[in-house]
């Protein structure tokens, strides 16, 4: 009587493992990796009392030379993160890096009370901390030394100073769209796309009427 019970357990465990394996293949990899830099609870005083909302600072990048900083504010944390991600994609820039994925020369910038310096280094890897490390890592830059020169602890100002420094070697990000299926510079016909010619003729007749 004990052997059948063991077989039943083995069968059940096999089904569970199959379900776990099948669920992992359906996920789609996101276009950009993201990292939340700062979340703040903001209070707004109105006639009826106080209104609370959340402000999120987020950085997004593809680790191939593109990076963007975004801000989002909403009554819910999830909505604020989505807004910040959309804003980061809107502010995305493409960095002009060297062949070794490093910056071509020293960069420095100042935003408000924050001051940042970025310097290339050969073979030392990523030497930076705090917000500078998060932004540089998501942009895909290697062999770089970053330093916050000022005493400012404001993460948002430090992040804006880093983006201001990187803007000196950046250009506007342009999303690569796959080309339309054109063979020998000819416009695809309805038959080639899979639309029957008869249905196209009916549409033209209705338009002429």
Image: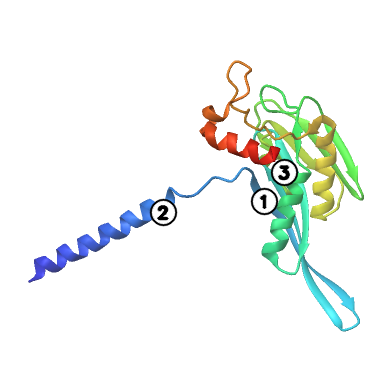
Left or right position of 175 against 147:
left
Left or right position of 70 against 138:
right
- Rendering quarter of residue 17: bottom left
Residue holding disc 2: 23
Residue holding disc 3: 135
Q: Are the residues flagged by discs 3 and 2 in contact, CB closer than 8 Å?
A: no
Q: Of circles 2 and 1, which is in front?
A: 2
Q: Residues within 10 Å of mark 2 (few under 14, many from 20)?
A: few
Quadrant, the C terminus: top right
Q: CA distance from mark 3 to mark 1?
A: 9 Å
Q: Is residue 150 above or below residue 13?
A: above
Q: Of circles 3 and 2, which is in front?
A: 2
What percent of the width, then of the height, locates residue 146?
76, 39
Name the N-terminal-most of marks 3 and 2.
2
Q: Are the residues flagged by discs 2 and 1 in contact, CB closer than 8 Å?
A: no
Name the N-terminal-most of marks 2 and 1.
2
Which residue is farthest bottom? Answer: 48
Q: CA distance from mark 2 to mark 1?
A: 25 Å
Q: Residue 122 versus residue 204: which sits nearer the camera?
A: 204
Label 3 SS: helix
Which residue is farthest front? Answer: 209
Q: Residue 131 versus residue 72: which sits nearer the camera?
A: 72
Quadrant, the N terminus: bottom left
What percent of the width, then of the height, locates residue 162?
81, 42
What percent of the width, then of the height, locates residue 92?
75, 41
């Amino acid at each position: 009587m004990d052997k059948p019970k063991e077989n039943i357990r083995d069968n059940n465990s096999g089904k569970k493992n199959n379900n776990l394996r099948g669920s992992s293949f359906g996920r789609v990899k996101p276009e950009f990796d993201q990292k939340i830099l700062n979340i703040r609870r903001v209070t707004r005083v109105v006639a009826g009392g106080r209104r609370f909302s959340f402000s999120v600072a987020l950085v997004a990048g593809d680790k191939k030379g593109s990076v963007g900083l975004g801000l989002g504010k909403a009554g819910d944390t999830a909505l604020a993160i989505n807004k910040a991600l959309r804003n980061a994609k809107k502010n995305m820039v493409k960095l002009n890096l060297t062949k070794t994925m490093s910056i071509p020369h020293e960069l420095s910038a100042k935003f408000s009370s924050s001051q940042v310096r970025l310097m290339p280094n050969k073979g030392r890897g990523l030497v930076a901390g705090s917000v500078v490390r998060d932004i540089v890592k998501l942009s895909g830059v290697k062999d770089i030394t970053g330093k916050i020169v000022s005493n400012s602890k404001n993460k948002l100002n430090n992040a804006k100073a880093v983006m201001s420094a990187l803007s000196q070697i950046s250009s506007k990000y342009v999303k690569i769209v796959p080309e339309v299926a054109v063979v020998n510079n000819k416009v695809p016909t309805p038959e080639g796309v899979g639309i029957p010619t008869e249905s196209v003729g009916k549409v033209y007749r209705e338009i002429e009427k």
